Image (spheres, rainbow, N blue to C red):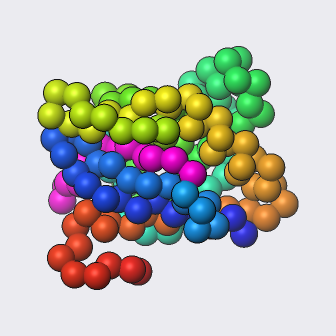
Amino acid sequence: MIDIRVDRISQIGDTTLSRIFIDNEPICYGLEDIYRDVKVYGETRIPAGTYPLTRRYEGKHFRKYNRTYRHKSSLWIRDVPNFKWIMIHAGNTAADTEGCLLTGSSVTMRNGSDFVTASVEAYRRLYTLISKRIDSEGATITFRDLDRCRSACTS
């Protein structure tokens, strides 16, 4: 089983910044919308927890990424309560997320929020690592809210 972990480290402005790990190895940064007690469509980050990660063979991200990158599927975060069609994809700001997880190689600040850069490069790196193993091993993705912990937060 591929173990993907998203450690949320800060929430600034309208973005949540994280580090993404595969099997405890840091791969890239992640960017999402902010935490909200009550979900707002397209403006709320994925709730903390562990979810299955599978391939998806339809939808706008699949069509775009298949055409642009020749990917055979999208990376779909499944079974998220009150969310539907949550993907991992390239993008730079909260405006690009629509509730999904974005990837980035580095982080900067823009208009009072975090902004990830070299997103396509980070996405390709992550996709390649997962795609090689997902069919034979399966995958889960765990989101940890380290940015909301007041004391040591390791679970």
Residue found 28% across the figure and 82% down from its top? 152
Quarter of the image holding residue 99? top left
Regarding residue 43, the answer to whether it shows in the image is: no
Q: Is residue 155 above or below residue 141?
A: below
Q: Position of residue 57 (x, y in %)?
A: 71, 36
Q: Is residue 31 magenta?
A: yes
Tell whether 38 sits left or right of 99.
left
Residue 59 vs 2, above or below: the answer is: above
- Location of residue 58 with respect to 143 vertically, above or below: above
Q: Position of residue 140 (x, y in %)?
A: 61, 64
Viewport quadrant of the C terminus: bottom left
- Give the side of residue 113 with respect to residue 128, left or right: left
Q: Residue 72's x, y, as percent?
A: 77, 33
Give the quadrant of residue 67: top right
Q: Residue at horizontal 57%, vertical 51%?
A: 27
- Left or right of 71 in this view: 98: left
When asked about the image quadrant of residue 126, the answer is top right
Nearer-the-camera pick, 19 or 96:
19
Q: Is residue 82 magenta?
A: no
Q: Is residue 38 left or right of residue 143?
A: left
Q: Residue visible at 50% across and 31% down?
A: 119
**Residue sitting at x 74%, y 31%:** 71
Q: Residue furthest top?
A: 67
**Outermost right residue:** 136
Let me know if residue 90 appears in the view: yes
Relative to 133, residue 32 above or below: above
Q: Nearer the viewer, residue 83 or 131?
A: 131
Give the extent of the magenta segment: 27-38
